[in-house]
Amino acid sequence: MGLTIRHLGVSKVRGRFARFDADVYVGASLDDTSVTAMIDLASIDTGNSDRDAHVSSPDLIDVARRPSMLFRSTRITGSGNDWTVLGDLAIGDVTQSFTIAVDFGGVESFPGGGPRHAGFEAKGEFRRKEFGIDIAMPPGVSGVMLGDVVKVELDIQLVEPDTTAL
């Protein structure tokens, strides 16, 4: 899972979370289909260990208070290649509605008779301040240190489970 946020209003910082878990249940209909994802916020990697430590600190995310981010779908709509997954995003003790735009890449069987693979690209954004994630500016310092909008991007490949072993 990748993320992008503005820094000082002039550039973007990109990062990713190295530890996460997702569960996709494909039901007989969209109403029976669900997505759940849990992200370990301490696993942030922006390519700069000092910045990662600061982002994880009580100054920003405060991973001691907010160890994870949890998404649970509530509804899936769409057709063809364009889908929308609506759900609830929880960071710490705050939960907000969250919408993910999904581009379905298709389904292909693995060469040689292996399982089918489905590909998706997904994008969404949320405002960090709505989850209580703010940055305290030092006395006498003004300006925008960090943007409020966090953009999330996912490239997902799902593999059809082997049901013969059941």
Image (cartoon, grey):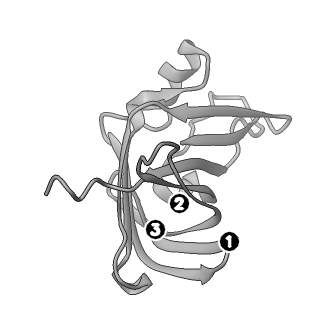
How far apart marks 3 and 1 lie (CA) works out to: 26 Å
Q: Is residue 14 above or below residue 97?
A: above
Foreground pick, 163 / 130: 163
Instruction: Say what amino acid the circle numbered 1 marks.
Output: Asn
* The quarter of the displayed image where residue 77 is located: bottom right
Residue bearing the label numbered 1: 81
Say if mark 2 contacts mark 3, CB within 8 Å: yes
* The quarter of the displayed image where residue 160 is located: bottom left
Residue bearing the label numbered 3: 96
Q: Which of the two discs, 2 and 3, labels the residue nearer the N terminus? A: 3
Q: Is residue 38 above or below residue 75?
A: above
Q: Secondary structure at mark 2?
A: helix
Q: Can you give x and y, in whole percent of width and height, for residue 55 in the image? A: 52, 29
Q: Which of the two discs, 3 and 1, labels the residue nearer the N terminus? A: 1
Q: Can you give x and y, in whole percent of width and height, for residue 24 in the image? A: 37, 61
Instruction: Say what amino acid the circle numbered 2 marks.
Output: Glu
Label 1 packing within 10 angstroms: few (<14), some (14-19), many (20+): few
Q: Secondary structure at mark 3?
A: strand
Residue shown at the point (60%, 25%) measured from the top left: 46
Q: Can you give x and y, in whole percent of width and height, for residue 134 in the image? A: 55, 44
Instruction: Say what amino acid the circle numbered 3 marks.
Output: Gln
Foreground pick, 55 / 138: 55
Label 3 packing within 10 angstroms: few (<14), some (14-19), many (20+): some
